[in-house]
Amino acid sequence: MPDTIAFSGSPLDRAAVLRRDGGWLERQLADPAARFLPLWNLDALVKLGNPRSLAWARLSLFEDVDFSPDPILLGLDGEVAHFAVDVSPLEDPLVALGLEGAAKFEELRSIGNELPREEIAVVAHARSLTNWHQRHRHCAVCGETTISVMGGVQRRCADCGAEHFPRTDPVAIAAIVRGDRCLLGRGPGWPDTMYSALAGFVEPGETIEEAVRREVWEESGVVVGNVRYVQSQPWPFPSSLMIGCIGEALTEELTIDRAELLDARWFTRDEIRAALDGAPGPLVVPPPFAIAHHLMRAWVEAQDG
Ligand SMILES: [Zn+2]
């Protein structure tokens, strides 16, 4: 398994202690060296040309916009503060910010293979946090307005004082194996030959292992015994944490829940190895930026070893 998987490995220090100091935050915002990444409808600003890279801006870029940006402190690179700025209120942000011909707002999935790994991780962080701020402007306790505090790692209700924290939604994802075969499923809207590891949200009152067993039973009718954690991955669409496991099946017969899966099948190790290596054939598996790819490879290579 790779040490750093896509969307992880941000080089920024999140400055958990320093950001408690309001005066320090004000100085970072005013520092001419500070860098600001604009996001528009959760798409990040990327420079045109090759190689692609994020288009960090200075705060002065936002001087003439007709809304009050509330920058989110992503962290520090050395002593330089890096912020995300949500410019979604702008109808035509490239024109409003004077960036036509220099940069473009890009969807994270479409630039996942073009930007350096560290920049993808920064965008993933910025995207999840910006989405959370957009959706939590009102207090879940009393309904009044909330304000961003500590540089955006919390929101606080201006009326009742309740503190609200960014969401991270745990998803258990598992390669289910039995002998020389692995169970994979195909979701609605996927290409005909694409299959992946089964996955589902961990529910309240469940362990990760229980979530794997329940999801696999509900979706495929297969009974799972031992479940082993392998690796996790932040999944910023909008803010999941994929918890990757390998589970040992105790049964093989399939009873597919067609509301969740179009199909599920047992594939052999040779079929999965060929698909992982990109060989043309009857099976396509997710690319290396998805944890499912690494779970399958971990199983195939353990069998090989
Ligand atoms: Zn409140």
Image: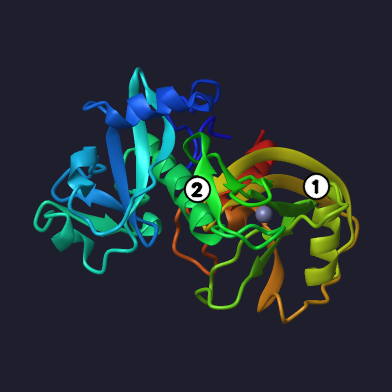
Q: Is residue 102 above or below residue 143?
A: above
Which element carries disc 1, helix, strand or loop?
A: helix
Residue 208's label in the rendered image is 1
Q: How is the image coloured?
A: rainbow
The residue tagged 2 is 129
x and y percent of residue 43 in the render? 35, 57
**Residue in view at x 42 percent, y 22 percent:** 24
Quadrant of picture, ligand 1: bottom right
Which quarter of the rendering shows the C terminus?
A: top right
Looking at the picture, tell me which residue is in the foreground, 256 or 91.
Answer: 91
Looking at the picture, tell me which residue is in the foreground, 213 or 284.
Answer: 213
The amino acid sitting under disc 2 is: Leu
**Residue in view at x 80 percent, y 54 percent:** 212
**Residue in view at x 88 percent, y 52 percent:** 205
With 86 as the anchor, is 190 left or right in this view? right
Which element carries disc 2, helix, strand or loop?
A: helix
